[in-house]
Amino acid sequence: MHIIDCRYRPNTPAWMNTFTRNPVYEEYVKLTGFDKKPVQSLADCAARLASLGIDKALVSGRDIESTYAAPASNDLVDACVAAYPSLFIGIHGYDPHKGMTAYKAMRRAIREQRSRGASIEPSMAHCPMDDARYYPLYALCCDYDVPVLVTAGLSPNMPKVLLSHSSPLALDKVAADFPDLRILASHGGYPWVNETIAVCLRHRNIYIDFSSSINKPMGEEYIKAANGCLADRFVFSSAHPFADVADALEQARHIGLSRENLEKMFSENARRLLGSAQEII
């Protein structure tokens, strides 16, 4: 069974620093001991993914420099792709407050095939996903037939981050305004579980994962949807290193999906999400 992980970051020292030294994660790190998690070399991370049967992993960058003065991680994305081009698929982060500078950088990364999509953080950027500052990016992704990955769910222990910026109502508007734009609502839009599922039912260009949300209240609704009305829209995301990739895989295999729908989630749906980028798979 082929497996594509649609939300992965290696637990190398450099990548872990992007979280532990980022002000947005200060409270989270303090309460969870995230800074004590083990680290590995990139080579060890790649070997572990291979041992788990993961064929491809989307490495999503983050750029929230304008709101938290933390360096973007796109250079680390490029390093992953350069070192292991057959394993890692780069997804560059996009800071909406950087205007044309961000737009030109993303266009260049896509043209050079360092990035096969865009990653946005509406809540951490303090900018709702239907804000006009994102619209040039959405149009760019449509032009190049690449997806947008949206952190659309709860990130706990972040007292200055507003959930409202990730509202599925905003996702509904973006999907309606850009029907050719494939969107991944990562973390399932939690806590708006039913609302996000409903938005996915309205728009066939929205995909969804339940990373970091399946064990929360109402998480069982994701399983029902993945086994039924949205079997062709769920993808697998480990959210590593926040959740261990092996644990996330084991959980996905035992949540009650039929074998057919599990195979769809692990590979087939992700290929459609990636669009023309699937040529590298």
Image (spheres, rainbow, N blue to C red):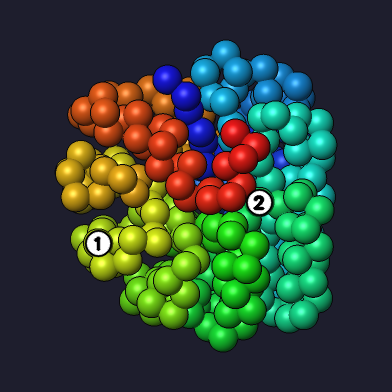
Q: Residue 67: which quarter of the image? A: bottom right
Give the residue number, with chain letter if any, for mark 2.
Answer: 116
What amino acid is labelled 1 in the image? Leu
Residue 201 is labelled as: 1
State the residue lying farthest toward the bottom. 132
Q: CA distance from mark 2 to mark 1?
A: 25 Å
Disc 1: CA contacts within 10 A as few (<14), some (14-19) or many (>=20) = some
Residue depicted at x 31% and y 45%? 232
- Left/right placement of residue 229 relative to residue 235 reads left
State the residue lying farthest toward the top. 51
Q: Is residue 21 visible?
A: no
Image coordinates for residue 182, horizontal then vertical, percent = 47, 60
Q: Is residue 244 above or below residue 52?
A: below
Residue depicted at x 75% and y 29%? 84
| Front residue of 203 and 80 | 203
Q: Is residue 254 above or below residue 13?
A: above
Image coordinates for residue 222, horizontal then vertical, percent = 25, 47
Task: State the SS at label 2.
Answer: loop
Q: Residue 96: which quarter of the image? A: bottom right
| Front residue of 172 and 44 | 172
Q: Is residue 254 above or below residue 82?
A: above
